[in-house]
């Protein structure tokens, strides 16, 4: 970029990694169940641009039960910890070179029978992260069984995509060292999350046993901002 020399020689990458996953599920009765998931992932990438090592620990718990016969409640919590080390080699760099980040989230939803053929689902996800702070992501869904083979549904929901470490910590000298003037590509720690308000509608038809046809429409509204 702008005359800066790139890596020379064979552009070879040394990539390795692995993960462990454990799940435990239990069905208490026909209406009550819970599950726990524990996940660990390790990746390492060494190429002419950078050395990157990432460790991820993810813990997840969900519990579902029926309340007052009509209400199906599902709730859960999640914890994710990442430990990242990225050492630049003159072409790509993150500053600081190491970062430990946490995401804590939870959700709850209630699906209830409004009528024998109509179901309403209310829910929200709550999240606290190192990048954009606290996020609330509610949703509302409705489904109507037109007949035994057709269902019409609609939904309104808010989703948030939080910034990544690359957007926050990137620090690249675009021009060669010692240049005057010098140009740098820097991240922004004040980026807010991208917010999506989605309006959805759909129709599902079961013409045959084991065969379904879905038609959906989506009207998204995407917003992003700096804090």
Image (cartoon, rainbow, N blue to C red):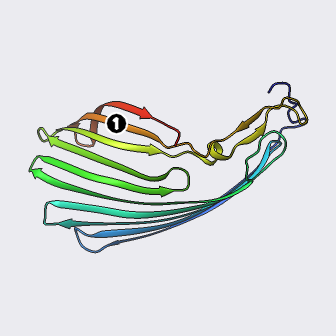
Q: Residue at x 79, y 46 (%)?
A: 50
> Could you say which is closer to the camera, residue 225 or residue 84?
225
> Could you say which is closer to the camera, residue 138 or residue 62?
138
Location of mark 1 (residue):
198
Residue 58, position as x, y percentages in the image: 53, 63
Asked if 136 appears above or below 21 in the picture, the reply is: above
Q: Is residue 53 left or right of residue 64?
A: right
Residue 164, position as x, y percentages in the image: 59, 46
Q: Is residue 36 left or right of residue 71?
A: right
The picture quadrant where one finds residue 5 is top right
Tally of numbered tags:
1
> Could you say which is closer to the camera, residue 46 or residue 209?
46
Would residue 102 be visible to someone looking at this image? yes
Q: Residues within 10 Å of mark 1 (few under 14, many from 20)?
A: some
Would residue 84 be visible to someone looking at this image? no
Asked if 78 appears above or below 199 in the picture, the reply is: below
Residue 54, position as x, y percentages in the image: 67, 57
Residue at the extreme bottom:
28
Q: Residue at x 63, y 45 (%)?
A: 168
Residue at the extreme left:
115
Secondary structure state at the residue bearing disc 1: strand
> Could you say which is closer to the camera, residue 33 or residue 148?
33
Residue 185, position as x, y percentages in the image: 72, 36
Asked if 60 appears above or below 141 in the picture, the reply is: below
Q: Quadrant of the N terminus?
A: top right
Q: Is residue 4 left or right of residue 155?
A: right
């Amino acid at each position: 970029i702008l005359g800066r020399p790139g890596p020379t020689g064979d552009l070879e990458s040394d990539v390795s990694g692995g993960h462990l996953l454990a799940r435990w599920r239990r069905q208490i009765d026909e209406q009550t169940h819970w599950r726990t998931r524990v996940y660990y992932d390790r990746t390492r990438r060494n190429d002419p641009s950078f050395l990157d090592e990432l460790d991820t620990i993810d813990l997840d718990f969900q519990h579902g039960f029926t309340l007052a016969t009509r209400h199906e409640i599902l709730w859960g919590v999640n914890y994710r910890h990442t430990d990242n080390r990225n050492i630049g080699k003159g072409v790509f760099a993150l500053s600081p070179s190491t970062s430990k980040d946490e995401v804590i989230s939870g959700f709850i939803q209630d699906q209830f029978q409004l009528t024998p053929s109509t179901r309403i689902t209310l829910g929200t996800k709550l999240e606290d992260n190192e990048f954009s702070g606290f996020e609330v992501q509610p949703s509302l869904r409705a489904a109507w069984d037109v007949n035994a083979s057709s269902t019409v549904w609609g939904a309104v929901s808010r989703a948030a995509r939080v910034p990544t470490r690359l957007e926050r910590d990137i620090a690249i000298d675009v021009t060669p060292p010692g240049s005057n003037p010098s140009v740098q590509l820097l991240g922004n720690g004040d980026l807010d999350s991208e917010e999506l308000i989605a309006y959805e509608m759909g129709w599902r038809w079961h013409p045959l046993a084991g065969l379904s046809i879905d038609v959906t429409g989506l009207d998204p509204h995407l917003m992003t901002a700096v804090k």
